[in-house]
């Protein structure tokens, strides 16, 4: 039953992505023809890369087109008031392999500060920035509350191991606080850290109070949504939009959602 739900959710996601790419779909064929479904899967994997290239953005050969869907097709962070202006400073916490960093640095002309703890991802991130001649500042660290935490490598992500049903090898990771970088200007703070959202915010409270950035947090459970909302509300922020809600049954990571916050009273 769970597998069927996931398969249906995946079909809906793929169809939605292809529509965003301007691909006309034959829905009966997509549902009942394996050959047609394989054809649309190839489009799904490669079309986003074509779109990125058309915008002047280049990527390392290891990047699959579908990795670029959120940044270049769905534009999940392109909400009113959250698109960086030229020269804005954006902290990309959980920069992964650089899809958003390239979009913000190349297309928006923002100054990007990128944090990514996994070495393989960090290497590709730096190569993608180099290919696009983006002079971003990069740190191969895990941001958090400054303490040590257990973490699992899930695919090519560093994640909270308690959130998964499967057993993953865990590692002890020493985190660094955002506050330790003593930033005196920050326009947008984006956090996507697979379950460590609250820890990153806790380690960045002084920076948030000083710079009052717009904040985007991808939360990974209903519980984390509530904790993030409570913390930022206490700091004088208001939630202006929830986006991209994915329900994941039978998992502690039971809902993935982007939450957009602005300082209370600030014009979007």
Image: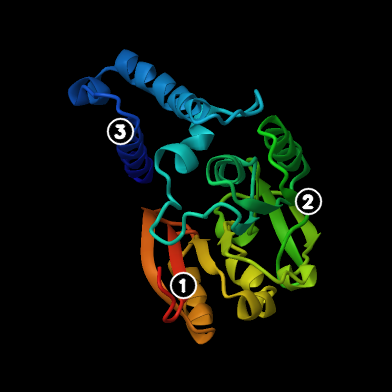
**Residue 81 placement (x, y as % from top left):** 43, 62
Visible residue check, residue 68: yes
Side of 221 relative to 200 (left or right): left
The residue shown at (65%, 71%) is 199
Nearer to me, 217 or 100: 100
Instruction: Identify the residue at image location x=67%, y=75%.
Output: 207
The mark that comes first in sequence, 1 or 2, is 2
Which residue is tagged 3? 15
Q: Is mark 3 on a helix, strand or loop?
A: helix
Q: Residue 262 carries which label?
A: 1
Q: Residue furthest left?
A: 28
Q: How far apart are marks 1 and 3 (CA)?
A: 32 Å
Give the structural element (helix, strand or loop) at label 2. loop
Q: Which of marks 2 and 3 is nearer the N terminus?
A: 3
Q: Is residue 147 visible?
A: no
Single out the residue that lies furthest toward the top: 35
């Amino acid at each position: 039953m769970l597998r069927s739900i996931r398969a249906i959710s995946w079909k809906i996601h793929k169809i939605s992505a292809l529509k965003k790419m301007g691909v006309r779909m034959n829905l009966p064929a997509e549902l009942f023809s394996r050959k047609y479904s394989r054809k649309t899967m190839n489009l799904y994997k490669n079309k986003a890369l074509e779109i990125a290239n058309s915008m002047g953005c280049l990527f390392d050969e290891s990047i699959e087109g579908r990795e670029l869907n959120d940044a270049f097709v769905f534009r999940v962070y392109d909400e009113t008031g959250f698109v960086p202006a030229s020269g804005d400073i954006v902290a990309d916490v959980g920069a992964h392999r650089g899809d958003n960093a390239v979009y913000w640095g190349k297309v928006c002309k923002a100054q990007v500060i990128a944090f990514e703890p996994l070495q393989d991802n960090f290497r590709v991130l730096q190569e993608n920035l180099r290919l696009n001649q983006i002079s971003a500042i990069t740190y191969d660290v895990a941001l958090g509350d400054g303490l040590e935490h257990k973490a699992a490598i899930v695919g090519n992500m560093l994640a909270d191991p308690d959130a998964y049903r499967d057993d993953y090898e865990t590692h002890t990771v020493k985190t660094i606080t955002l506050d330790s970088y003593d930033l005196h200007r920050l326009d947008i703070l984006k956090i996507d850290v697979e379950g460590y959202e609250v820890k990153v915010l806790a380690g960045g409270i002084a920076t948030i109070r000083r710079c009052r950035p717009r904040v985007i947090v991808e939360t990974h459970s209903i519980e984390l949504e509530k904790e993030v909302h409570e913390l930022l509300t206490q700091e004088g922020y208001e939630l202006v939009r929830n986006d991209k809600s994915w329900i994941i049954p039978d998992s502690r990571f039971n809902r993935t959602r982007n939450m957009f916050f602005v300082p209370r009273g600030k014009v979007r």
